[in-house]
Amino acid sequence: MNPETLSTAPSDFTWKARYAIRARERRSFQTVLDAERLVDPSRASEVSIARDGGALCVHLTHPILGGTIVEDMRFDELDGRIVTRSVLREVRDDAGALARREEVLQFHHGTLGLPRAAYPEVALPFVLAFSQHDGKKRSLYAWINDRFVARVYVEAVGRGSLDLPIGKRDAIEAVMYPDLNDWVALGSVITRLARPFLPKYRMWFDAAPPHGVLRFEGPYGPPGAPEIVLSLSALG
Protein backbone atom coordinates (compact mmCIF):
# COMPACT_ATOMS: atom_id res chain seq x y z
CA MET A 1 0.00 0.00 0.00
CA ASN A 2 1.59 3.23 -1.17
CA PRO A 3 1.39 6.30 1.09
CA GLU A 4 -0.89 8.95 -0.37
CA THR A 5 -1.47 12.65 0.14
CA LEU A 6 -4.66 13.58 1.97
CA SER A 7 -7.83 15.00 0.47
CA THR A 8 -8.27 18.71 0.97
CA ALA A 9 -11.10 20.24 2.97
CA PRO A 10 -14.35 21.24 1.26
CA SER A 11 -14.36 24.89 0.20
CA ASP A 12 -16.72 25.84 3.03
CA PHE A 13 -14.95 23.82 5.74
CA THR A 14 -14.16 25.66 8.97
CA TRP A 15 -13.62 24.27 12.44
CA LYS A 16 -13.23 26.20 15.66
CA ALA A 17 -13.52 24.23 18.86
CA ARG A 18 -12.49 23.89 22.46
CA TYR A 19 -11.49 20.59 24.04
CA ALA A 20 -11.23 19.37 27.60
CA ILE A 21 -7.71 17.99 28.00
CA ARG A 22 -6.41 15.48 30.51
CA ALA A 23 -3.79 12.78 30.90
CA ARG A 24 -4.66 9.35 29.53
CA GLU A 25 -5.49 7.01 32.41
CA ARG A 26 -3.79 3.92 30.97
CA ARG A 27 -0.66 4.54 29.00
CA SER A 28 0.14 2.52 25.88
CA PHE A 29 3.83 3.48 25.84
CA GLN A 30 6.45 3.42 28.56
CA THR A 31 8.03 6.86 28.70
CA VAL A 32 9.69 9.34 31.02
CA LEU A 33 7.31 12.05 29.75
CA ASP A 34 4.25 11.94 31.99
CA ALA A 35 1.18 13.89 30.89
CA GLU A 36 0.05 14.09 34.53
CA ARG A 37 3.02 16.38 35.16
CA LEU A 38 2.58 18.34 31.94
CA VAL A 39 -1.01 19.16 30.91
CA ASP A 40 -3.24 21.62 32.74
CA PRO A 41 -6.80 20.20 32.78
CA SER A 42 -8.18 23.39 34.35
CA ARG A 43 -7.89 25.12 30.96
CA ALA A 44 -9.15 24.09 27.52
CA SER A 45 -7.26 23.27 24.35
CA GLU A 46 -8.32 25.28 21.31
CA VAL A 47 -8.30 24.20 17.66
CA SER A 48 -9.15 26.21 14.56
CA ILE A 49 -8.98 25.27 10.89
CA ALA A 50 -9.56 27.89 8.19
CA ARG A 51 -8.29 29.15 4.86
CA ASP A 52 -5.88 32.05 4.58
CA GLY A 53 -5.28 33.00 0.99
CA GLY A 54 -4.09 29.89 -0.79
CA ALA A 55 -3.24 27.99 2.38
CA LEU A 56 -5.24 25.77 4.70
CA CYS A 57 -4.26 26.72 8.26
CA VAL A 58 -4.42 24.59 11.40
CA HIS A 59 -3.90 26.43 14.69
CA LEU A 60 -3.56 24.48 17.96
CA THR A 61 -3.25 25.82 21.51
CA HIS A 62 -2.72 23.44 24.43
CA PRO A 63 -2.48 24.40 28.13
CA ILE A 64 0.42 23.00 30.10
CA LEU A 65 1.34 23.54 33.73
CA GLY A 66 3.16 26.85 33.80
CA GLY A 67 2.55 27.77 30.18
CA THR A 68 1.07 27.07 26.77
CA ILE A 69 2.00 25.17 23.60
CA VAL A 70 1.05 27.01 20.41
CA GLU A 71 1.30 25.38 16.98
CA ASP A 72 0.58 26.80 13.53
CA MET A 73 0.70 24.58 10.45
CA ARG A 74 -0.04 25.57 6.86
CA PHE A 75 -0.90 23.29 3.97
CA ASP A 76 -0.95 23.96 0.24
CA GLU A 77 -3.79 22.61 -1.91
CA LEU A 78 -2.81 20.84 -5.13
CA ASP A 79 -5.38 19.15 -7.37
CA GLY A 80 -7.74 18.39 -4.50
CA ARG A 81 -5.00 17.15 -2.15
CA ILE A 82 -2.97 18.87 0.57
CA VAL A 83 0.77 18.97 1.22
CA THR A 84 2.53 20.54 4.19
CA ARG A 85 3.92 24.05 3.64
CA SER A 86 5.22 25.22 7.02
CA VAL A 87 5.26 24.39 10.73
CA LEU A 88 5.68 26.66 13.75
CA ARG A 89 5.68 25.39 17.33
CA GLU A 90 6.23 27.57 20.40
CA VAL A 91 6.19 27.00 24.14
CA ARG A 92 5.46 30.06 26.26
CA ASP A 93 5.34 30.48 30.02
CA ASP A 94 2.42 31.94 31.97
CA ALA A 95 3.78 35.44 31.43
CA GLY A 96 3.92 34.90 27.66
CA ALA A 97 7.71 34.69 27.50
CA LEU A 98 9.03 32.41 24.76
CA ALA A 99 10.76 29.29 26.10
CA ARG A 100 11.07 27.12 22.98
CA ARG A 101 10.56 27.67 19.26
CA GLU A 102 10.71 25.27 16.32
CA GLU A 103 10.05 26.50 12.80
CA VAL A 104 10.05 24.96 9.34
CA LEU A 105 9.66 27.63 6.67
CA GLN A 106 9.71 25.41 3.57
CA PHE A 107 8.61 21.91 4.53
CA HIS A 108 9.30 20.44 1.09
CA HIS A 109 12.61 22.17 0.46
CA GLY A 110 14.43 20.01 -2.08
CA THR A 111 17.54 19.44 0.04
CA LEU A 112 15.83 16.91 2.34
CA GLY A 113 13.61 14.99 -0.05
CA LEU A 114 10.69 14.50 2.35
CA PRO A 115 7.81 12.47 0.86
CA ARG A 116 4.81 14.46 -0.32
CA ALA A 117 2.54 12.43 1.94
CA ALA A 118 4.32 13.62 5.11
CA TYR A 119 2.36 15.61 7.71
CA PRO A 120 3.18 16.94 11.21
CA GLU A 121 2.09 14.19 13.56
CA VAL A 122 0.14 16.52 15.88
CA ALA A 123 -1.92 17.85 12.96
CA LEU A 124 -2.90 14.45 11.61
CA PRO A 125 -6.09 13.90 13.66
CA PHE A 126 -7.39 17.28 12.51
CA VAL A 127 -6.52 17.08 8.81
CA LEU A 128 -7.86 13.52 8.71
CA ALA A 129 -11.22 14.97 9.76
CA PHE A 130 -12.03 16.15 6.26
CA SER A 131 -10.29 13.32 4.43
CA GLN A 132 -12.43 10.58 2.94
CA HIS A 133 -14.45 8.61 5.50
CA ASP A 134 -15.07 5.64 3.26
CA GLY A 135 -13.75 2.88 5.54
CA LYS A 136 -10.64 2.26 3.44
CA LYS A 137 -7.28 1.66 5.07
CA ARG A 138 -4.71 4.30 4.12
CA SER A 139 -1.05 4.94 4.77
CA LEU A 140 0.95 8.15 5.02
CA TYR A 141 3.96 9.55 6.86
CA ALA A 142 3.93 11.20 10.27
CA TRP A 143 6.62 13.87 10.50
CA ILE A 144 8.04 14.33 13.99
CA ASN A 145 11.16 16.21 12.92
CA ASP A 146 13.52 16.06 9.95
CA ARG A 147 15.35 13.09 11.49
CA PHE A 148 12.26 11.11 12.47
CA VAL A 149 9.59 10.40 9.86
CA ALA A 150 7.44 7.31 10.43
CA ARG A 151 5.06 5.51 8.12
CA VAL A 152 1.63 5.01 9.72
CA TYR A 153 -1.66 3.38 8.78
CA VAL A 154 -5.12 4.85 9.39
CA GLU A 155 -8.38 2.94 9.20
CA ALA A 156 -11.96 3.26 10.41
CA VAL A 157 -12.99 0.63 12.96
CA GLY A 158 -16.65 1.41 13.62
CA ARG A 159 -19.45 3.82 14.34
CA GLY A 160 -21.35 4.54 17.53
CA SER A 161 -22.62 7.07 20.01
CA LEU A 162 -20.08 9.07 22.00
CA ASP A 163 -20.64 10.92 25.29
CA LEU A 164 -18.78 14.23 25.37
CA PRO A 165 -18.71 17.38 27.52
CA ILE A 166 -20.68 19.04 24.70
CA GLY A 167 -23.27 16.24 24.71
CA LYS A 168 -23.88 12.98 22.88
CA ARG A 169 -22.76 12.69 19.25
CA ASP A 170 -22.76 9.98 16.59
CA ALA A 171 -19.16 9.24 15.74
CA ILE A 172 -16.85 7.44 13.33
CA GLU A 173 -13.99 5.77 15.21
CA ALA A 174 -10.59 5.41 13.56
CA VAL A 175 -7.20 4.14 14.65
CA MET A 176 -3.69 5.08 13.57
CA TYR A 177 -0.68 2.86 14.20
CA PRO A 178 2.96 2.67 13.07
CA ASP A 179 4.43 0.35 10.46
CA LEU A 180 7.10 -1.57 12.39
CA ASN A 181 8.77 -2.57 9.12
CA ASP A 182 9.94 1.01 8.85
CA TRP A 183 12.47 0.14 11.57
CA VAL A 184 12.90 -3.65 11.41
CA ALA A 185 12.08 -5.94 8.48
CA LEU A 186 9.67 -8.32 10.23
CA GLY A 187 7.92 -9.86 7.26
CA SER A 188 4.19 -10.10 6.61
CA VAL A 189 3.44 -13.01 9.00
CA ILE A 190 5.09 -11.51 12.08
CA THR A 191 3.68 -8.08 11.26
CA ARG A 192 0.16 -9.51 11.10
CA LEU A 193 0.62 -11.33 14.42
CA ALA A 194 2.06 -8.23 16.12
CA ARG A 195 -0.60 -5.85 14.91
CA PRO A 196 -3.14 -6.43 17.75
CA PHE A 197 -0.42 -5.51 20.26
CA LEU A 198 0.71 -2.31 18.57
CA PRO A 199 -0.03 0.83 20.59
CA LYS A 200 -2.65 2.85 18.74
CA TYR A 201 -3.78 6.43 18.40
CA ARG A 202 -7.59 6.59 18.58
CA MET A 203 -9.72 9.27 16.97
CA TRP A 204 -13.46 9.87 16.83
CA PHE A 205 -14.92 12.08 14.08
CA ASP A 206 -18.39 13.56 13.89
CA ALA A 207 -20.49 11.21 11.73
CA ALA A 208 -22.18 14.26 10.19
CA PRO A 209 -20.30 16.74 7.98
CA PRO A 210 -17.95 18.50 8.46
CA HIS A 211 -16.59 15.44 10.36
CA GLY A 212 -14.67 17.46 12.95
CA VAL A 213 -12.66 15.72 15.66
CA LEU A 214 -14.84 14.82 18.63
CA ARG A 215 -12.24 12.99 20.68
CA PHE A 216 -8.57 12.05 20.47
CA GLU A 217 -6.76 9.59 22.69
CA GLY A 218 -3.06 8.78 22.44
CA PRO A 219 0.44 10.26 22.54
CA TYR A 220 0.66 13.93 21.66
CA GLY A 221 3.41 13.31 19.19
CA PRO A 222 5.40 10.15 18.41
CA PRO A 223 5.38 6.95 20.48
CA GLY A 224 6.79 7.93 23.86
CA ALA A 225 5.22 11.40 23.89
CA PRO A 226 2.90 12.34 26.77
CA GLU A 227 -0.43 10.54 26.33
CA ILE A 228 -3.52 12.72 26.47
CA VAL A 229 -7.28 12.70 25.93
CA LEU A 230 -9.01 15.55 24.11
CA SER A 231 -12.83 15.70 24.32
CA LEU A 232 -14.93 18.28 22.49
CA SER A 233 -16.40 20.77 24.98
CA ALA A 234 -17.54 23.71 22.82
CA LEU A 235 -17.87 24.84 19.22
CA GLY A 236 -17.27 28.30 17.80
Image (cartoon, grey):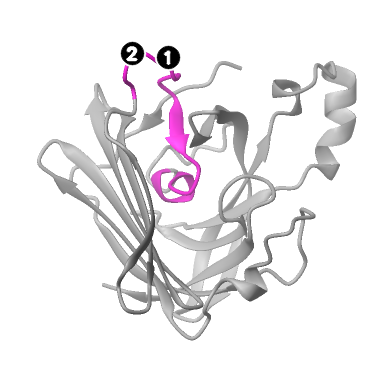
**Magenta segment boundaries in residue numbering:** 108-127
Which residue is disc 1 drawn over? Answer: 113
Furthest toward the bottom, the residue is 42
On whether residue 123 falls in the magenta region, the answer is: yes
The Cα–Cα distance between marks 1 and 2, rounded to whole angstroms, is 5 Å
Q: Quadrant of the C terminus?
A: bottom left
Dominant secondary-structure state across the stretch colored magenta = loop
Residue in front for this viewpoint, 214 or 57: 57
Query: Is residue 74 rendered to the left or right of residue 167?
Result: left
For label 1, the crowd category at 10 Å Cα-Cα, with few meaning under 14, some 14 to 19 and many 20 or more, is few
For label 2, the crowd category at 10 Å Cα-Cα, with few meaning under 14, some 14 to 19 and many 20 or more, is few
Mark 2 residue element: loop
- Relative height, residue 10 to residue 236 (above, below): above
Residue drawn 73% across the image and 59% down it? 32
| Residue 142 horizontal/vertical position (percent) | 53, 35
Query: In which quarter of the view is residue 99 placed?
Result: bottom left
- Relative height, residue 52 to residue 149 (above, below): below
- Relative height, residue 128 to residue 153 (above, below): below
Which residue is disc 2 drawn over? Answer: 110
Residue drawn 68% across the image and 35% down it? 178
Mark 1 residue element: loop
| Residue 179 horizontal/vertical position (percent) | 70, 29
